[in-house]
Image: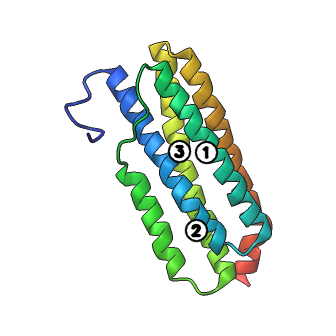
Amino acid sequence: MGLFTKDIKSMDDLFLHVVQDIYYTEQQITKALPEMIEKATNRELTAAFKSHLAETKKQVSRLEQVFELLGQSPKGTSCPAIDGIIAEAKEIAGEIDNKKVLDAALIAAAQAVEHYEITRYGSLIAWADELGHEAAAKLLKTTLDEEKATDKMLSSIGEKKVNLKAAG
């Protein structure tokens, strides 16, 4: 079911679909982060990726709680957007031999993922509030705050260390 298909007939349908989308997204991130951890050479960046992997696993668990609140079984729906972001990151990372430049590219790729998640969680929270899903909105807000903090941390690592070294 794509985002703009006839299967989405109500706001509840849309909300569930995007919860399934972000559930799939978080699972794909859980699979992609170990490779990013392995490729990163900056210690602070490696630590940030490891921390975010543990955090992402908690986010998956929180989404499973949202499904439960909605009376649904946890299920993802494929997300071409996140698949494309991750594929692009892998392609770019595979083309960079300079480890310092690779760290900068990994930060950019991770931030592309974070920005996608931030948009999704922001929409979901607004819709949860509108649909009267207060408990779900609270769970989603916790995750949104984590995603924003991760984005800010990645910016800091890039701006204070990694980008300077990559630029030479």
Q: Which one is earlier in the sequence, the residue at label 3 or at label 1? A: 1
Checking the image for residue 47, the label placed there is none
As helix, strand or loop, the secondary structure at mark 2 comes to helix
- Residue beneath disc 1: 57
- Residue beneath disc 3: 117
Image-based side of 120 in relation to 55, left or right: left
Which corner quadrant of the image does residue 49 belong to?
bottom right
Q: CA distance from mark 2 to mark 1?
A: 16 Å
Residue drawn where x is 49% and y is 23% of the image: 68
The residue under label 3 is which amino acid type? Answer: Glu
- Camera-near label (3 vs 2) is 2
Residue drawn where x is 61% and y is 27% of the image: 139
Which corner quadrant of the image does residue 19 belong to?
top left
**Few, some or many C-alpha atoms within 10 Å of disc 3 (few <14, some 14-19, many ≥20)?**
many
Is the residue 37 above or below the residue 66 in the image? below
Across and down, in percent, residue 83 comes to 40, 57
Across and down, in percent, residue 157 comes to 76, 62
Image-based side of 63 in relation to 37, left or right: left
Which corner quadrant of the image does residue 136 belong to?
top right
Residue drawn where x is 64% and y is 64% of the image: 107
Q: CA distance from mark 3 to mark 1?
A: 14 Å
Considering the image in quadrants, where does the N terminus appear?
Answer: top left
Q: CA distance from mark 3 to mark 2?
A: 19 Å
Q: Residue furthest left?
A: 6
The residue under label 2 is which amino acid type? Answer: Glu
Q: Which one is earlier in the sequence, the residue at label 2 or at label 1? A: 2
- Residue beneath disc 2: 35
